[in-house]
Every structure is written in C-alpha cells, then in structure tokens.
Amino acid sequence: MDAEERSKKMKCGLEKAPHRSLLYALGLTREEMERPLVGVVNAASEVVPGHMHLNSLAEAVKAGVRMAGGTPLQFPAIAVCDGIAMNHEGMRFSLPSREFIADSIEIMARAHAFDALVFIPNCDKCVPGMLMAMMRLNIPSVLVSGGPMLPGDIGPHQRGDLITVFEAVGKVRSGAMTEEELEHLTERACPGCGACAGMFTANSMNCLAETIGVALPGNGTIPAASSARIRLAKKAGMQVMDLLRKNIRPLDIVTADSVANAVAVDMALGCSTNTVLHLPAVSGEAGLKLGLEIFDEVSRKSPNLCKLSPAGSHFMVDLDNAGGIPAVMSELDKLGLIHKDCVTATSKTVGENLTDLKARILDPEVIHSVDNPYSSQGGIAILRGSLAPEGAVVKQSAVAPEMMCRDVRARVFDCEEDAMHAILDGKIKPGDGVVIRYEGPRGGPGMREMLSPTAAITGMGLGKDVALLTDGRFSGGTNGAAIGHISPEAADGGVIALVHEGDIIHIDIPGRTLNLMVDAKELEARRAAFVPPTTECPYAVLRRYAHMVSSAATGGRYKDTF
C-alpha cells in the first residue's frame, strides 16, 4: 500500500461518510481530514516520573507534524515504573507490560488506519514495547523518548541517583548510615522528570533506538528537562512526514547491520543486561534472529568505552555533554564496528549523520577512546555451562575484579523476598552465592528484577565477595557479580532447580563459563527425586502470560504457537 493510502481506506469514498462524520465529531476540519493522519502514541503518566512530562513532548510532536503538513491524533500507552514496582508483586507485571504495550498499539494503529506514527515512550518496558509495535506495523515511524533525568545533588560536590538510594538501604542496615541520612538522600537523589539518571534499562534502550536509527540523534542523551528535548520532539514530528513522503519504513531501517551497530554500542556503553531481552524481541518482530551468541561475539571485539552509573561516577547528562551516541559510534567506527551505510530516521545514512554532526569525543574522561578503553571487551558477557546450558547474562563492566573468577557456596532461595530477608539480616557471608530461582519469565511469572538484593549486597559492603545468581533478571542499575537470565529456568526444569544449599558454583566470566560443581550421577538422582512447586499464580493476566511466554534466552517474547 502506498505511503498515504492507509487512512484513505478509512476516510474517503461514499461508503465512508459515517467515518467522516465521526472525524468531524473529533473537531477535525475537512482540510485536516484530507491530510495524512499521524498517530502520536503518548505514554504520559502521573505515576511514572520518567513520563510525567510527556504531554509537553506530545504537543511539540503534534506541532512538528502540523508544520510539515500532517494531522496528528494522539492516543495513550501504559507504562510501569520499575523503581516503584520493585521488590513487591508489582515487579511481576513489568516485563509482561512490554507485550501488552506492543499489542495495544498495534490494535489502535490498525483499527484507525494511520498513515504514520510517532512513538513517545521513556521508561523500561515502554521503549521496547513501542519498538516491537513499530516493527509489526511497518509504517513510517519515529521514536522520541522523554530523555534522562538529571542526577541529584545529594551533598557538597556529590551527585547521586535512584541507585544511590537503593544501595543506601544496605548501608543503614549495616550501620554505615542513619535512617535520617537516608531520608535526606531520598528527597534529593531524583530531582525531577526523566528516566533515572544512569545507564539503566530505559536510557540503554533509548540510546540503542538512536543507534539503530529509528530515533533522531540526541534521543538517548538529551536531558528530559532541557528545551533541546522539546526541539527534538518537534523535529521528530516534522521528520515523520518526510519519511512518509519517501515511504521509508521501520523495516528499511532495522536490518541485520543496524542491529549489529546497536549491539556494538551496547557493549561500548556498558548498557543494562535487559538489552539482551529487548533487542532480540525487537529483532524478532522485524524478522531477524539475534541470538545470545551474537552478543558474546560482539562483546569480545567491542571495547567498553564508558562507565556510567551504576558502573562509574558519570551520568547521562555527562554522556550528552561528551558528544553522546554519535561520538561513541564515531569512535567504534575506527575499529570497523559500525555499518555506516544503514539508513536512519533522518532519511540519511549513519555515515552521513556522523559527518553532519561532526561526531567526536568532547570529554575523554566520559567517553574513552578505543586506544584507551576501560576494557578491551564490552560491558556484557554471556556465560554457559552446566548451570546455564542455554546461557546466562552478566554486566561484566560492573563486576569487581575479585569476582571475575570465583568459587561460591550456594545459598538457595525460591523467591526474592526470602533472599532479601537473609541479606538484610546478615545471614549472607563473604564467599556465598545467593541463588534465587522460580523468578524466570514463566516461573515468576514475569521475571522480576533483583535490584533490591544486589543493591543491599553492595550497600552492606559485600559487593566484592558475594555473587547473586538467578533465572530472574536485573535492573540496569545493578552492579556486582549479578548473573541473571539463567536458562532453562527452574520452572522449566532447568539445572538451577536442582541446586542444593552449600553446593559449589564456579564462576569464570573471562572464560564465559558457569558451572555447578556437582557430578552427573548426583544430578540424575536429584532430578529423579525433584518435585516442582505447585503454587498457582493468583492473577489471571500473569497466568495467561506464563502460558504464552518463551525462554529468556530468546528474548522472552510470546511463543509463535500455543
């Protein structure tokens, strides 16, 4: 179908007079009806700090669409704030929301025959959910995020963010901080609108959307509170009309090469391990296969150039001031890791964008050169072995050297809450490996993030001595030896279900292995005696999700067949 034919089948012709009557009811003029109809997907919310300002961006997008000759029509999308949902049953609903967001947008866009779309997400699962919908629909589209929060001024010459608060909980329990000091910190760490200020999941995905090319340069790093973010939204509204005229669609932009660019930048930035769930899911919707082996292959040759919170002391605003994603891509291009002929939402190629922007590093303290990387390998590593035959994921750029190769004693818990109580009660000791199972996509259900336990371990001074291993996942704010996505998960009979208290687990991140040091005969005996838990989830929406979801090793998308 031609670029502007989609809405014509809904609004033109004798038999569509009733449809035009309903468009008149919206207050549209005949002239507005005759223009291309552009859906503006707005995830604004009074619940999510990263989304509380999105109405202003939506107005800017609509202004841009009108300036370029289109008629914008706004509709909503949901979003979960992972920080607020963390460490209680709310986190079970976060990853499932990604699929629901994609489904609901597809329903709205197909039912109302939009000619083009502008997507306005910001926080964790909203960004990949919108990208998945974009791939399914394959009509001219641009994504413009809400942008990152500024770091908080938490003391003289001190900056912090949400992770500072999570880790402070452990400090209070260990006696290193008072509750009064903690409360003072809570009031200052998150100063306003935007996605939390470090390289956590939301900012990771917004940066990768820019890298892939479905968002304009600056999308990942321009602060939420900056007027430059408003200008970017206006440009997105104008640019989607250019894409419509040229009939450039998402599947023209999202290719094997552009996804490879994203994986390389992912490794250079030290992004959230959640990208290993979301990029395969988005790629799958685009008809591309992105396996865990590709992440590991790219990680071995793409250097880690940035250490933003939680891995280091820099924040997203520092990355923006240092040259942003274009600077990182330009640096990686020196190693031949960037495919510059990929088309982007600017209607130009990656190479043309980098030239136009004069992309270069402006602050070598924030973005290291390829000649002086933080490490020669990327931020994420994929581990395999007897404990994780289908793979596990670790943010190696945030692991202390002492934990890169280590034997740990298994301390086994069947849910996050039990592990959290043990950590805060001082029952976890140096050399322990906290195993949290039945938290995978199906077993959770919902594959909860384990930020609270990892932050508590760090806050209690155990980050260099204790590992956490789970079939659940981790926040982008997690640091330390946090190994997640262990597959197969316990609920699917994975080896993690057979781990006993006191077992030795061998972690070798440089060697990419994760092994349970129990012989095969003993494992056979354990499997023969194994009785899986029978507790049924009380929530219908999660029971349906558990029935449909696939393994974390394939991105946790819905299965193709049921």
Image: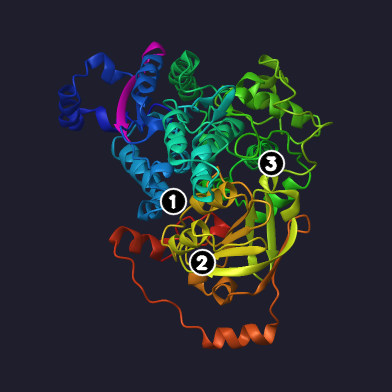
Q: Which amino acid type corresponds to the residue marked 2 in the rendered image?
A: Arg
Task: From the image, tell me which residue sits under label 3.
Answer: 267
Which residues lie in the magenta part?
A: 66-76
Tell me if I can see residue 156 in this picture: yes
Lateral position of residue 531 relative to residue 80, left or right: right
Lateral position of residue 205 relative to residue 187, left or right: right
**Quarter occupied by the C terminus:** bottom left
Where's residue 106, x and y in %? 36, 42
Where's residue 376, x and y in %? 80, 41
Mark 1 Cα shell of 10 Å, populated few (<14), some (14-19), many (≥20): many
The Cα–Cα distance between marks 3 and 2, rounded to whole angstroms, is 27 Å
- Decide whether residue 512 is among the magenta residues: no
Where's residue 169, x and y in %? 48, 45
Secondary structure under the numbered disc 3 in the rendered image: helix
Secondary structure under the numbered disc 1 in the rendered image: helix
Task: From the image, tell me which residue sits under label 2.
Answer: 437
Lateral position of residue 474 relative to residue 332, left or right: left
- Decide whether residue 72 is among the magenta residues: yes
Label for residue 95?
A: 1
Mark 2 Cα shell of 10 Å, populated few (<14), some (14-19), many (≥20): many
Secondary structure under the numbered disc 2 in the rendered image: loop
